[in-house]
Image (tube, rainbow, N blue to C red):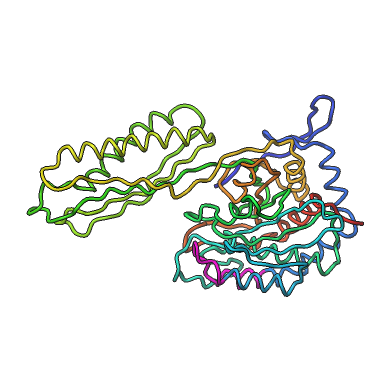
Amino acid sequence: MNFKKISIFTTFLLGTIVFAQKDVIIEKKYSKTIVRLAKSKKVQAAFNKIKELEPKTTKRHISLTEIEAPPFKEFKRAAVFANYFKDLGLDSLWIDSEGNVLGLLKGTEGKRTVALDAHLDTVFPEGTNVKVRIKKDTLFAPGIGDDTRGLSMLLTILETIKTLGIKTKDNILLIGSVGEEGLGDLRGVKHLFRNGGPKIDSWIAIDGGDIGRIYNKALGSYRYRVTFKGPGGHSWGAFGLVNPHHALGEAISDFVIKANEFTLKGPKTSYNVGVISGGTSINSVPFESSMQIDIRSIDPSRLDAMELLLEESTKKALDNQNKIKRQGPNLTLEIKKIGNRPSGELPMSLPLVQKTLAAASYFGASPELIRGSTNSNIPISKGIPSVTIGCGGKGGKVHSLDEWWINEEGQKAIQMTLLLLLSETGLVN
């Protein structure tokens, strides 16, 4: 998705000078803080180190991309990523029961913990060819940008901190998380923020896109697998049996009519039947018919309302098809929720959001606050200071076999991420 860039201009608000861009306001105090931190000798040395490490960043980027990490099977990549953490040195390192890789750098005070996350998984199934192809300055491979570049950024940031002996007041928790994509349903981050999970006071996620795209708003979604089941039989000899496909077709038609009317007004809400499956041959009454449906909204209550519409339409189709059967047992219906990503929104005035805007502006971006579905959905929904930021460079065809990425000023995203991390954790002089 492309976002229009608008230059920053100065305006006045309640007597305080602020920077504004489109609907974005950056308070001057945060811009001053970011500029002061960026110009410090330690941070300038870190920026130079990041540039120096670019060949190694690219090498690790390619190496990690070529380890497949399909949904629910991220363990191969997780093991290699954990070894990178181990070699670079951490105060503690572990892989939790969900498969997340976590590495802790203790702060001098350690009263707070700031997490920096990139996700290990890709959308591609097991057996996908993930060999990186290089053409001139372009890297081609499934998952090359989303989110393997983020993983390599974490390693470069860690190496920079350790090599230069940078100390922070707060703890830094570096995370390679699982389950961000598709039916993974944010399982890695849900596990982190469960009751009894590690203490995380502030959250920064890296997940594709340019450095001007800043997520402080979570797009919620419900996902379902709807399945009609019947006895199945021959299309001629068993004619009159209940037909699961007929029921599914009626359910989809009825739901779309109701959902269309509902979504014409009110906060933006979407619906999509993305997968339909079932049946064995053209001359067989299927014994099963199912669909997977995705519903999204910026308003949690709208998701619940859409769920009711889905239940009404599927039960109506079930009853209608059972009424017109001529022989055999009734159809059965199962509605299983297979995804639940919460909505939420954090204010632009939040210090972490302000620091992120200021850091992006420092590196020449025209920042925008946007809504999306990322690992930050979970902490945002809990009111924990959280943002998702981009991995920089240039890329395209995300979630396709021809995904590509170009390291065009890619170091800026790493420098910006480190700057933001140090502003949030507190740099020790």
Q: Name the quadrant containing residue 349.
A: top right
Q: Name the quadrant containing residue 353.
A: top right
Q: Quadrant of the C terminus?
A: bottom right
Position of 154 compared to 163: left or right? left
Q: Name the quadrant containing residue 144.
A: bottom right
Inspect this view and state whether residue 21 appears: no
x 33%, y 36%: residue: 255
x 22%, y 59%: residue: 280
Relative depth, front residue between 11 and 185: 185
Where residue 392 appears, as percent x and y from the top left, is 66, 56
Which residue is most to the right? 429
x 78%, y 36%: residue: 19
Position of 5 compared to 68: left or right? right
Where residue 244 appears, as percent x and y from the top left, is 23, 48
Inspect this view and state whether residue 424 appears: yes
Where residue 225 appears, as percent x and y from the top left, is 38, 49
Which residue is most to the front? 196
Which residue is most to the left? 237
Residue 99 part of the magenta segment: no
Where residue 146 appears, as percent x and y from the top left, is 57, 59
Q: Which residues are magenta?
A: 58-76
- Using the image, determine if residue 101 lies above or below residue 22: below
